[in-house]
Image: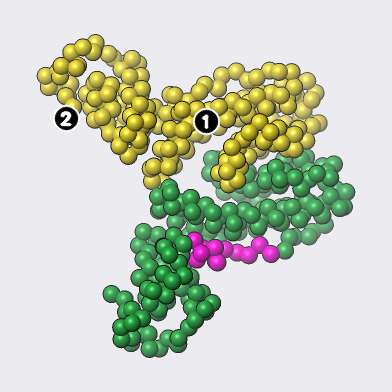
Chain colours: A green, B yellow
Amino acid sequence: MVASRWTAAAPARTAAPRRRGAVLEQAILDAALEQLGTVGWSGLTMEGVAAAAQTGKAAVYRRWPSKVDLVADALRAALPSFEGAPDLGGVREDLLALCARMRAAMYSRTGFALRSVLHECDTATAERFHDVIFRGLIEPSVKLIKEVVHRGIERGEVRSDGTADYVCDVIPAMLMYRSKVCGSEWRDEDFEALIDQVMVPLLRP
Amino acid sequence: MVASRWTAAAPARTAAPRRRGAVLEQAILDAALEQLGTVGWSGLTMEGVAAAAQTGKAAVYRRWPSKVDLVADALRAALPSFEGAPDLGGVREDLLALCARMRAAMYSRTGFALRSVLHECDTATAERFHDVIFRGLIEPSVKLIKEVVHRGIERGEVRSDGTADYVCDVIPAMLMYRSKVCGSEWRDEDFEALIDQVMVPLLRP
């Protein structure tokens, strides 16, 4: 049983300072991520997360109406950041660097947690987590791809309509397709094949 | 309750001629597909399929050890066939015709059944049905894309290494990605954008 905020504080709670706002929120998200790693999606409960974060269940429910919302936010907050496009002087090298960054995110601790959640939950719930992948991984990647391609256009290295949506979707589409359908693990040479067989010919002026 | 082959035949069964081999197999597959449409993945049982096919449960289990195997085969058998690549004189028109054929398969009665099964069953079972999509839809499509591209190479219209795996995976990858991630319904103009922005520039010599 978990001590509610309204009952007498358990010994452990007397040690925890009273946290509010962003600090408490982060403590709950951290606890949720840790619970995912130990008891998995099925074992995780709002009560368990509250206890691990040394707070009450009401403090959790006030911010996240359901377990799906909480876990989605916990995963999202822990995904590697996608700030700043690489700038190595050529579109080929920049795209290879971006691919390596996407792979690092896919294979990060959070990436693995995300995939194990997807595997454990039912298909309707999985839809919700696909959104985490889209907004936290795919959307920022496409933004960086466009930045890299745009710089290539300015250098005269890339065709003038190279930032078209369909063109800049090719890398994430191939990453998703070949991971899911062909079981590709995306070694460095797979990325080189993708960039040299597809992206370089596709982008030439 | 369903009459087994070993008990006295029920009145309905006396009307059915004794079928064997491919004929009985097809009757069972048809019954499974019909049950999917009426009671869905969750409601479908091996007993129900046997009853609808006017045979015994043992005749079903002898061929398919589980419900997943039976449903996968039923869906596979009902997917539109992918025989013969289009040959309209140019790679652009041929690829557009192939895209339209892939869309027709995705939106066929069987395609819908396949998606609703994927939605109803758990993630581990869904993996098995992805294989049906791969072998029944993606693999034959890629084969036809390679045929079309190869003919383009012979006409001098396409770069000599145009049949490379990564190149010929771009169309199915984009179909999967933009359906799943962007919710695209693939209208004719979407296919034109894909072919004109991506495939034509990618394949030019």
| Visible residue check, residue B23 | yes
Residue A187 in the image, given as x and y percentages of width and height: 62, 50
Residue B30's disc is none
Question: What type is the residue that disc 2 sits on?
Answer: Met
Residue at image position (55%, 22%) is B82
Q: Residue at x 69, y 33 (%)?
A: B189
The residue lying toward the viewer, choosing from B105 and B59, is B105
Q: Is residue B129 left or right of residue A185?
A: left
Q: Distance between the residues labelled 1 and 2?
A: 36 Å
**Left or right: where does residue A27 sit relative to residue B120?**
right
Could you tell which of marks 1 and 2 lies nearer the N-terminus? 2
Q: What residue type is labelled 1?
A: Tyr
Q: On the image, which quarter does residue A42 sit in? A: bottom left
Q: SS for tag 1?
A: loop
Q: Nearer the viewer, mark 1 or mark 2?
A: 1
Q: State left or right for residue B152 relative to residue B103.
A: right
Range of residues picked out in magenta: A72-83
Q: Which of B29 and A174 is in front in this view?
A: B29
Name above or below for residue A7 compared with residue B94. Answer: below
Counting from the top left corner in percent of width and height, residue A114 is at 49, 57
Q: Do labels 1 and 2 share a chain?
A: yes
| Label 1–label 2 contact, CB within 8 A | no
User: Residue placed at 46% from the left, 51% from the top?
Assistant: A126
**Mark 2 sits on what residue?**
B1
Residue at which label 1 appears: B107
